[in-house]
Image: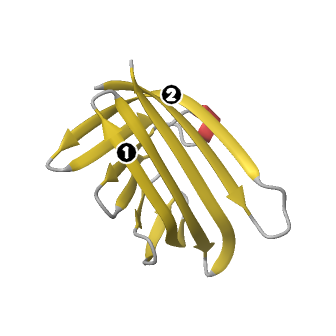
Amino acid sequence: MQVMLTIAGTQRCEEDEPQVTKLVTQGTLTRKDGKTYLSYEESEMTGMIGTTTTFCIEEARVTLTREGSLQSQMVFEVGVEDRSLYDMGFGALMIAVCAEHISAQFGDDGGTLHIVYSICIEQESAGTIEYHIEAKRK
Protein backbone atom coordinates (compact mmCIF):
# COMPACT_ATOMS: atom_id res chain seq x y z
CA MET A 1 0.00 0.00 0.00
CA GLN A 2 1.21 3.51 -0.80
CA VAL A 3 1.65 5.65 2.32
CA MET A 4 2.86 9.06 3.40
CA LEU A 5 5.61 8.71 5.96
CA THR A 6 6.39 11.34 8.57
CA ILE A 7 9.77 10.52 10.09
CA ALA A 8 10.97 12.49 13.10
CA GLY A 9 14.46 11.82 14.41
CA THR A 10 16.24 13.19 17.46
CA GLN A 11 19.91 12.59 18.25
CA ARG A 12 21.14 13.40 21.76
CA CYS A 13 24.77 13.61 22.82
CA GLU A 14 25.85 14.41 26.38
CA GLU A 15 26.67 18.13 26.24
CA ASP A 16 25.25 19.12 22.85
CA GLU A 17 21.79 20.38 22.04
CA PRO A 18 19.59 17.62 20.55
CA GLN A 19 19.67 17.48 16.74
CA VAL A 20 16.15 17.14 15.37
CA THR A 21 15.29 16.15 11.81
CA LYS A 22 11.92 15.70 10.16
CA LEU A 23 11.17 14.16 6.80
CA VAL A 24 7.85 13.70 5.03
CA THR A 25 8.05 11.37 2.05
CA GLN A 26 6.14 8.79 0.06
CA GLY A 27 6.73 5.15 0.80
CA THR A 28 5.17 1.73 0.92
CA LEU A 29 3.74 -0.36 3.74
CA THR A 30 3.53 -4.12 3.19
CA ARG A 31 2.40 -6.82 5.62
CA LYS A 32 3.53 -10.40 5.00
CA ASP A 33 4.07 -13.51 7.16
CA GLY A 34 3.47 -11.62 10.41
CA LYS A 35 5.96 -8.89 9.51
CA THR A 36 5.37 -5.26 8.52
CA TYR A 37 7.69 -3.55 6.01
CA LEU A 38 8.07 0.21 5.61
CA SER A 39 10.20 1.35 2.66
CA TYR A 40 11.12 4.70 1.15
CA GLU A 41 13.71 6.30 -1.12
CA GLU A 42 16.22 8.60 0.56
CA SER A 43 16.61 12.12 -0.86
CA GLU A 44 19.18 14.89 -1.12
CA MET A 45 17.83 16.23 2.17
CA THR A 46 19.02 13.13 4.04
CA GLY A 47 22.34 13.04 2.18
CA MET A 48 21.72 9.45 1.08
CA ILE A 49 20.28 9.93 -2.42
CA GLY A 50 20.19 6.65 -4.34
CA THR A 51 19.50 4.63 -1.18
CA THR A 52 16.36 2.67 -0.29
CA THR A 53 15.59 2.41 3.44
CA THR A 54 13.43 -0.45 4.72
CA PHE A 55 12.21 -1.15 8.25
CA CYS A 56 11.20 -4.80 8.83
CA ILE A 57 9.02 -4.80 11.95
CA GLU A 58 8.49 -8.03 13.87
CA GLU A 59 6.98 -8.66 17.30
CA ALA A 60 10.13 -7.93 19.35
CA ARG A 61 12.63 -6.84 16.69
CA VAL A 62 13.06 -4.16 14.03
CA THR A 63 15.64 -4.48 11.26
CA LEU A 64 16.72 -1.32 9.43
CA THR A 65 18.27 -2.01 6.03
CA ARG A 66 19.75 0.54 3.64
CA GLU A 67 20.67 -0.49 0.10
CA GLY A 68 22.07 1.51 -2.78
CA SER A 69 24.68 4.27 -2.53
CA LEU A 70 24.95 3.44 1.18
CA GLN A 71 24.88 -0.12 2.57
CA SER A 72 23.96 -0.95 6.15
CA GLN A 73 21.83 -3.17 8.32
CA MET A 74 21.02 -2.59 11.99
CA VAL A 75 18.94 -4.91 14.17
CA PHE A 76 17.06 -3.44 17.12
CA GLU A 77 16.02 -5.65 20.04
CA VAL A 78 15.55 -4.17 23.50
CA GLY A 79 18.64 -4.85 25.61
CA VAL A 80 20.57 -6.60 22.80
CA GLU A 81 23.63 -5.00 21.21
CA ASP A 82 23.94 -5.30 17.42
CA ARG A 83 27.25 -4.62 15.67
CA SER A 84 27.49 -3.99 11.95
CA LEU A 85 29.52 -2.23 9.27
CA TYR A 86 28.11 1.03 7.94
CA ASP A 87 29.43 1.14 4.36
CA MET A 88 29.38 4.68 2.95
CA GLY A 89 30.89 3.74 -0.41
CA PHE A 90 34.25 5.36 0.35
CA GLY A 91 34.82 3.46 3.59
CA ALA A 92 33.06 1.62 6.38
CA LEU A 93 32.58 2.32 10.08
CA MET A 94 31.83 -0.18 12.84
CA ILE A 95 28.47 0.70 14.41
CA ALA A 96 27.00 -0.77 17.61
CA VAL A 97 23.36 -0.12 18.51
CA CYS A 98 21.31 -1.20 21.52
CA ALA A 99 17.56 -0.57 21.61
CA GLU A 100 16.13 0.89 24.80
CA HIS A 101 12.50 1.04 23.61
CA ILE A 102 10.52 -0.30 20.63
CA SER A 103 6.80 0.08 20.01
CA ALA A 104 4.87 -0.53 16.80
CA GLN A 105 1.18 -0.45 15.97
CA PHE A 106 -0.04 -1.04 12.43
CA GLY A 107 -3.46 -1.60 10.91
CA ASP A 108 -5.19 -1.42 7.54
CA ASP A 109 -4.64 2.33 7.11
CA GLY A 110 -1.07 2.68 8.42
CA GLY A 111 0.41 2.97 11.86
CA THR A 112 3.34 4.10 13.97
CA LEU A 113 6.83 2.91 14.85
CA HIS A 114 8.84 4.32 17.75
CA ILE A 115 12.45 3.29 18.46
CA VAL A 116 14.93 4.66 21.01
CA TYR A 117 18.49 3.32 20.88
CA SER A 118 22.03 4.12 21.96
CA ILE A 119 24.73 4.15 19.31
CA CYS A 120 28.53 3.78 19.32
CA ILE A 121 30.63 4.55 16.27
CA GLU A 122 34.09 2.97 16.21
CA GLN A 123 33.73 2.21 19.96
CA GLU A 124 32.94 5.85 20.84
CA SER A 125 29.52 6.74 22.21
CA ALA A 126 27.53 8.87 19.77
CA GLY A 127 24.61 9.30 22.14
CA THR A 128 20.98 8.24 21.83
CA ILE A 129 18.78 8.33 18.75
CA GLU A 130 14.99 8.35 18.75
CA TYR A 131 12.86 7.70 15.65
CA HIS A 132 9.13 8.23 15.48
CA ILE A 133 7.56 7.18 12.17
CA GLU A 134 3.92 7.61 11.17
CA ALA A 135 2.58 5.90 8.07
CA LYS A 136 -0.79 7.01 6.66
CA ARG A 137 -2.55 5.50 3.65
CA LYS A 138 -2.48 7.88 0.67
Numbered label attached to residue 78:
none
| In the displayed structure image, the side of residue 57 where residue 48 appears, left or right | right
Tell me where residue 72 appears, x and y as whole percent: 43, 59
Badge 2 is on which residue?
25
Residue shown at 67% from the left, 76% from the top:
125
Instruction: Look at the image and name its color scheme.
Output: secondary structure
Tell me where residue 25 appears, x and y as whole percent: 50, 27
Badge 1 is on which residue?
105
Residue shown at 50% from the left, 41% from the top:
133
Looking at the image, is 44 positioned above or below residue 76?
Answer: above
| Separation (CA) of disc 2 from disc 1 | 20 Å
Name the residue furthest left: 33
Residue shown at 44% from the left, 71% from the top:
78
Q: Secondary structure at mark 1?
A: strand
Tell me where residue 82 appears, x and y as whole percent: 43, 74
What amino acid is found at the position of numbered circle 2 in the picture? Answer: Thr
Q: Nearer the viewer, mark 2 or mark 1?
A: 1
Tell me where residue 85 appears, x and y as whole percent: 46, 69
Q: Identify the image quadrant of the N terminus.
A: top left
What amino acid is found at the position of numbered circle 1 in the picture? Answer: Gln
Q: Nearer the viewer, residue 64 or 36?
A: 36
| In the displayed structure image, the side of residue 97 where residue 44 appears, left or right | right
Q: Nearer the viewer, residue 122 or 30?
A: 30
Residue shown at 30% from the left, 43% from the top:
37
